[in-house]
Image: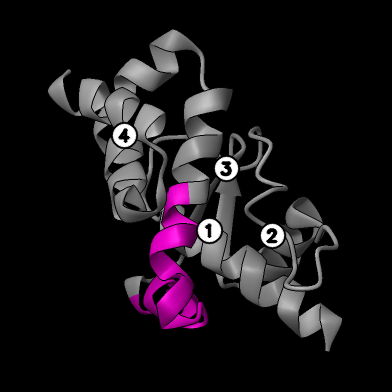
Amino acid sequence: DSMRASMISVSGTAATMGSSSVSLLSLDLSNACTDQDGSDSSYASSIEEFEEEGLCEVDNEECRFMHDQIQSAAFELINPEQRDSFRGRIGSILLRSLSPEELEASLFEVVGLLNCAATNITDEERDELAELNLK
């Protein structure tokens, strides 16, 4: 059961990132891939399992689903009430993890993820998000 929760979390993270130009495996996505009970899932090993099953392809540390329908199905595993906060967590991790050059190249995607969780942020975070939206 915890393996299923881990796979849901990891597949949801990968599906949320989708066709992003950001390298999934090189970032610290452990916070986004935390199981509901708070334990860390093994993101990289789960991605390897997906690759072995032919669900995704990993090339130069970037993960791509083999078909859009697989990505959609993986995203559907995330509880609908948690999708926006999930996207926001991934956006926050990317914002902290990316170099200034990488952030500039992926700014639209990162800000889009952060905007999903805009209703659940502090005033300080809202000001920072507004500045990012204006870039």
Secondary structure of residue under mark 4:
helix
Mark 4 touches mark 3? (CB < 8 Å): no
**Image location of residue 30, percent across then percent down:** 72, 47
Where is mark 2, residue-wise?
47
Where is mark 4, residue-wise?
126
* Quadrant in the picture for residue 87: bottom left
First reached walking from the N terminus: tag 4 or tag 1: 1
Secondary structure of residue under mark 1:
helix
Secondary structure of residue under mark 2:
helix
Amino acid at dot 3: Leu
Where is mark 3, residue-wise?
24
Q: Give the side of residue 111 with respect to residue 25, left or right.
A: left
Q: Does the magenta run of residues contain 121? A: no
Task: Kindly report the distance in space between the C-alpha atoms of the residues bearing marks 2 and 1.
Answer: 8 Å
Where is mark 1, residue-wise?
14
Q: What residue appears at the point 41 percent right and 45 percent down from the top-left corner? A: 121
Decide: is 110 above or below 37: above
**Image location of residue 43, percent across then percent down:** 74, 55
Q: Give the side of residue 81 with respect to residue 61, left or right.
A: left
Task: Kindly report the distance in space between the C-alpha atoms of the residues bearing marks 1 and 3.
Answer: 7 Å
Q: What crowding class fits label 1: few (fewer than 14 Cα within 10 Å), some (14-19), or many (20 or more)?
A: many
Q: Does the magenta run of residues contain 87? A: yes
First reached walking from the N terminus: tag 3 or tag 2: 3
**Image location of residue 79, percent across then percent down:** 49, 81
Q: What crowding class fits label 4: few (fewer than 14 Cα within 10 Å), some (14-19), or many (20 or more)?
A: some
Mark 1 touches mark 3? (CB < 8 Å): yes
Mark 4 touches mark 1? (CB < 8 Å): no
What secondary structure prevails in the magenta region?
A: helix
Mark 3 touches mark 2? (CB < 8 Å): yes
Mark 2 touches mark 1? (CB < 8 Å): yes
First reached walking from the N terminus: tag 2 or tag 4: 2
Q: Nearer the viewer, mark 4 or mark 1?
A: 4
